[in-house]
Amino acid sequence: MSNFQGALFSYKDFRKSLHHQHVSPRVWKGAELTQARKNLEHSDVDTVALAHDTSVEGCEVTPGMAIAMQWLNPGVVLKGHAHSWWHLFVIQSGSGALTLGDADEVSVSPGDVLLVPAWTKHGFVNTGTVEPLAMLNMSNMPQVALLSNFADSHGLITRPA
């Protein structure tokens, strides 16, 4: 039973421990994002996660939040799916359509900002024939994972053993 023994701390010390490490300002240049995309293995949907340092843990760019660039190639459909984190998308280039739940498609174009709450079924299609549909994708995925609630409509998403 002793290996189940927990530790005790003063509430004051606990509160001090909740302060995250300071995050410094960062800039990600468009040319670097484009090059990172070119370095990916070819797929219909390319995604590059931004990081505030050189570690994969740095992909939590600010406490609880991740940012990525996503590109859907012309004609590609990203099927509707739902999960426990929200998204905020900003369309950068290209043209497409967004589906939310059972509603009709909504056309999207550069400058559009799209909020997809947690557990809202959503999908995209690149309606263009030449250029990718490029989207800045912000989410609270790290926060949800920290709360052990990292799940999609198929169930809990776990780490590989």
Image (spheres, rainbow, N blue to C red):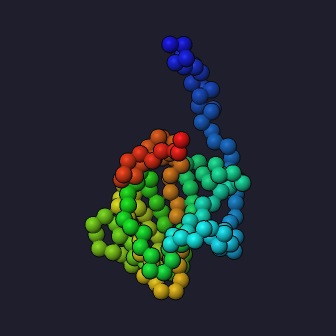
State the residue at coordinates (70%, 57%).
25
| Residue 126 as seen in the image, left or right of residue 2 | left
State the residue at coordinates (60%, 36%).
18
| Residue 103 as seen in the image, left or right of residue 47 | left
State the residue at coordinates (46%, 60%).
87
Quarter residue 124 falls in: bottom left
Instruction: Estimate the x, y position of residue 23 in percent, counting from the top left.
Output: 68, 50
Instruction: Estimate the x, y position of residue 24 in percent, counting from the top left.
Output: 71, 53
Q: Looking at the image, which residue sits at the far left?
A: 102
| Residue 5 as seen in the image, left or right of residue 33 | left
| Image: 4 above or below 41 | above
Q: Looking at the image, which residue sits at the far top?
A: 1
State the residue at coordinates (63%, 39%).
19
The number of numbered badges drawn on the structure is 0
Q: Looking at the image, which residue sits at the far bottom?
A: 130
Instruction: Estimate the x, y position of residue 17 in percent, counting from the top left.
Output: 62, 33
Q: Is residue 69 visible?
A: no
Instruction: Estimate the x, y position of residue 120 in percent, counting from the top left.
Output: 35, 59
| Image: 128 above or below 2 | below
